[in-house]
């Protein structure tokens, strides 16, 4: 028979004070980005945590996404075949990698 540890109300309240509330948001980067939408989180109105001694701050990581450059053309050598016949003109434009920070959680920290 397994023994289960039950937490007291004091322990549960203490654990909840370290937690931060957050909501999922979808950022629309516009038509010149692929992917166009990035899923992220925002810390909600409860700004303080651990009995008001710390703050809820977003934690993020960096992702690379493609950005279409409409302001520049890429020169190609003569007789170079670019793209596929019948390819939509928007897909023949110059695309470059761009880094974006994406929040994935909110932490209780200094």
Image: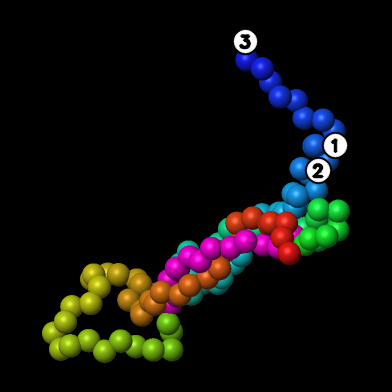
Q: Quadrant of the C terminus?
A: bottom right
Few, some or many residues within 10 Å of mark 2 (<14, 14–19, 20+): few
State the residue at coordinates (71%, 54%): 23
Q: Tell me which corner region of the image, top left, top right, bottom left or bottom right, holds residue 71.
A: bottom left
- Image position of 9 (left or right of 108): right
Membership of 66 in magenta stretch: yes
Which image quadrant is residue 47 in? bottom right
Q: Picture coordinates of residue 40 (x, y %)?
A: 61, 59
- Residue at the disc numbered 2: 14
Q: Does the CB distance between marks 2 and 3 fall below 8 Å? A: no
Which element is circle 2 on?
Answer: helix
What is the distance, in whole Å, between disc 2 and disc 3 at their CAs? 29 Å
Image side of residue 54 versus residue 58, left or right: right
Q: Which segment is the magenta one?
A: 56-68
State the residue lying farthest toward the top.
1
Q: Mark 1 touching mark 2, by CB under 8 A?
A: yes
| Residue 57 vertical position relative to residue 82 in the rendered view, above or below | above
The residue sitting at 76% across, 43% down in the picture is 15
Where does residue 70 sit, x and y in percent of width and height?
43, 84
Q: Is residue 45 left or right of residue 66?
A: right
Judging by the rendered image, the residue that carries numbered circle 1 is: 10
Front in this rendered view, residue 106 or 109:
109
**Left or right position of 107 against 28:** right
Instruction: Please tell me how crowded label 3 is: few (under 14), some (14-19), or many (20+) other residues with Cα within 10 Å.
Output: few
The first of marks 1 and 3 along the sequence is: 3
Q: Where does label 3 land, which residue?
A: 1
């Amino acid at each position: 028979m397994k023994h289960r540890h039950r937490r007291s109300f004091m322990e549960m309240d203490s654990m909840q004070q370290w937690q931060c509330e957050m909501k999922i948001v979808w950022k629309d980067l516009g038509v010149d980005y692929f992917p166009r939408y990035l899923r992220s989180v925002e810390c909600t109105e409860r700004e303080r945590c651990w009995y008001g001694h710390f703050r809820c701050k977003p934690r993020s990581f960096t992702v690379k996404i493609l950005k279409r450059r409409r302001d520049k053309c890429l020169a190609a050598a003569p007789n170079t075949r670019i793209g596929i016949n019948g390819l939509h003109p928007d897909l023949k434009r110059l695309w470059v990698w761009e880094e974006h920070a994406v929040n994935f959680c909110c932490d209780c920290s200094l």
